[in-house]
Amino acid sequence: MLDFIYYPVSAILWFWHQAFGYVLGKNSGFAWALAVVFLVFTLRLVLYKPFVKQVRTTRQMQELQPQIKELQKKYKNDRQEMTVQMQKLQKEHGFNPLMGCLPVLLQVPVFLGLFHVLRSFNRTGHGIGQLGMSPYDNAHTPNYIFGVDDVQSFLSARLFGAPLSAYITEPATVLQSFADYGGVPSKVAIAAVSIPLMVIAGIATHMNARASVARQSAEAAANPQAAMMNKMALYVFPLGVLVGGPFLPVAILIYWVSNNIWTYGQQHLVFGRIEKEEEEKKKAALERRAQHAPKPGAKPVDVRKKQAAAKVEDAPVEDAVSDAPQASQNGAKPAPGARPSTGKKRSGNRGRANQKRRR
């Protein structure tokens, strides 16, 4: 049913085993272990961009937390309107909550696919995903991309005496399937390899969670739901590795360790770049503000007066030109000794009074 996951996962694992097997030997346990490690690195490299978007989404969520709280307080009695306003806020800031959990969701099928492919190298057991084959039939049945020779090579491979598909609680009847391919392994050898890997995986899980919690804002950490998730990530998940480790094959524990190592390095790289980008943005904003600020000792300019003066200069000239004498408009010079005309006519009554006085 999940062949669309099993075949790509087995193909990547096959490629890396061919590469390392060419150098270390086809039946080398280290060649198979390195193939698992580089399978993890390949898949995490493919998921690099979704991881960066996840980090940016998480930081954006922290920045929008005050506005979200205001909306929750404002529309606490109207759930429908609160949802509408939340969606509007997310759309305005280009925020997509799905990107916050997309990398984790994508890693789950990969983990399940790898778990199934590794268990399918030994299908002699009974239960979920097991076919109850005989040791001979199992060794002569292909496993997805892997042919019969590859299956027998995996059964023969040992990492410090432990087969990569074996686990601490594996039944003794299932361990008998390794008899013709390197001998039946002991539980002590399997535990000697599995327990250190379990401890390293648990510590790495805790350190990754601790680094992630340390980068959270104070407001986000104070959120009850976030605080509960932080405690689970810090203590419950690492403890889950120790509790579930005895039931996981050695190859899965290698996957877990290498996945956490990649996550730890990737977090420091991505967070460092994002913090550097934010510092550059803040620096650019301060430089723009400094350019527009008045120089030390300079008298501050009243912007309102400056705008008013500009309006006066741009205002249209009054119609004073239309009141000028007609002669000056035609370019004629006024007569010598003549009083310049203001363009206003004398009243007729004043002229008649002067005529009477002369008479």
Image (tube, rainbow, N blue to C red):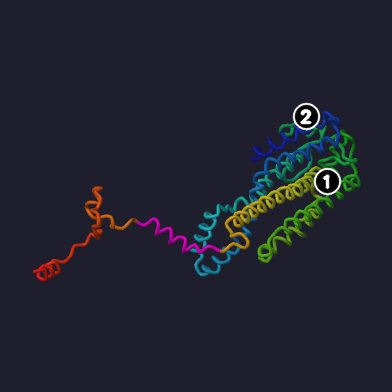
Quadrant of the rendering where the C terminus is positioned: bottom left
Tell me the tag on residue 42. Answer: none
Q: Which residues are magenta?
A: 300-315
**Does residue 314 belong to the magenta stretch?**
yes
Instruction: Give the amino acid at mark 1.
Output: Tyr
Residue 342's spot in the image, x, y percent? Answer: 25, 60
In this view, 136 is above or below 263: above
Amino acid under label 2? Val
Query: Helix, strand or loop at disc 1?
Result: loop
Which of the two residues, 192 or 275, is positioned nearer the viewer here? Answer: 275
- Comparing 305 with 176, the one in front is 305
Picture quadrant where residue 146 is located: top right
Q: In x, y percent, where is residue 348? A: 13, 66
Q: Which residue is mark 1?
A: 167
Residue closest to the eye, 51 or 345: 345
Q: Badge 2, how many Cα within 10 Å: few under 14, some, many 20+?
A: some
Q: Is residue 317 left or right of residue 6?
A: left
Label number found at residue 148: 2
Q: Residue 257: x percent and y percent?
A: 80, 47
Q: Is the residue 277 above or below the residue 358 in the image?
A: above
Q: Is there a contact, CB below 8 Å, between mark 2 and mark 1?
A: no
Magenta span: helix, strand or loop, mainly? helix
- Between residues 164 and 212, which one lies in front from this camera angle? 212
